[in-house]
Amino acid sequence: MKVVIVALALVGLAAAASVSDEAAQIIRSEFEQTAGGYVYSYETDNGLSRQETGEVKQALDEENKPHDVVVVRGSYSYTDPEGKPQTITYVADETGFHAEGDSIPKEPVSRR
């Protein structure tokens, strides 16, 4: 879980760094821990925002033994250097980190 949270924090910092060198002020920040996970969000005065939920679920490991994993779902938004609003949505679970958005390169579709 710590690795997922650190990775997501680095993604958010990279997005923030690409927007401006000026320090942004947080205008809204919320965190609520629930029995089965958490809800987290923030917004800054320079247009950055992030919403995320984490939920504990059971998954099977390589040996088909059950263990708890945290499934993280969320999105973050920013304005790119060209002034275009960008939103990235993501899911991080036992299969890895999966992100989608206009600014994320797509795998070419092979034609046969």
Image (spheres, rainbow, N blue to C red):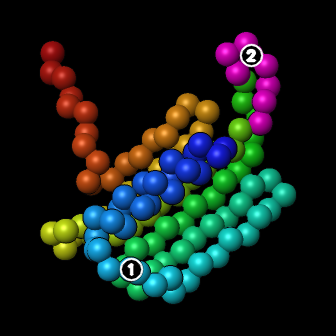
Identify the secondary structure beneath mark 1. loop
Q: Position of residue 107 (x, y in %)?
A: 25, 33
Label 1 with label 2: CB-CB less than 8 Å: no
- Residue sitting nearer the eye, 36 or 26: 26
Mark 1 and mark 2: Cα distance apart in space:
47 Å
- Which of the image's four quarters has the N terminus? top right
User: Could you say where residue 108 lies in the image, as x and y percent from the top left?
Assistant: 20, 31
Q: Amino acid at mark 1?
A: Ala
Q: Residue at x 19, y 23 (%)?
A: 110
Q: Residues within 10 Å of mark 1 (few under 14, many from 20)?
A: few
Q: Which numbered marker is on residue 23?
A: 1
The nearer-to-camera label among 1 and 2 is 1
Q: Which mark is residue 64?
A: 2
Residue 62 lies within the magenta run = yes
Residue type indicated by callout 2: Asn
Look at the image and say whether residue 108 sits in the magenta stretch. no
Instruction: Please provide percent x and percent y for residue 84.
Output: 21, 70
The magenta span reads 61-68
Q: Residue at x 55, y 31 (%)?
A: 95
Image coordinates for residue 55, horizontal then vertical, percent: 71, 50
- Is 1 situated above or below 38? above
Above or below residue 38? Residue 68 is above
Left or right of 21: which side holds 5? right
Q: Is residue 89 visible?
A: no
Q: Which mark is residue 41?
A: none
Q: Quadrant of residue 68?
A: top right
SS assignment at label 2: loop
Principal secondary structure, stretch drawn in magenta: loop
Residue at image point 41% right, 85% down: 45
Which residue is drawn at the image coordinates 41% and 46% (left, top)?
A: 99
User: Quick check: 71 left or right of 50?
Assistant: right
**Residue farthest to the right, as pictured:** 35
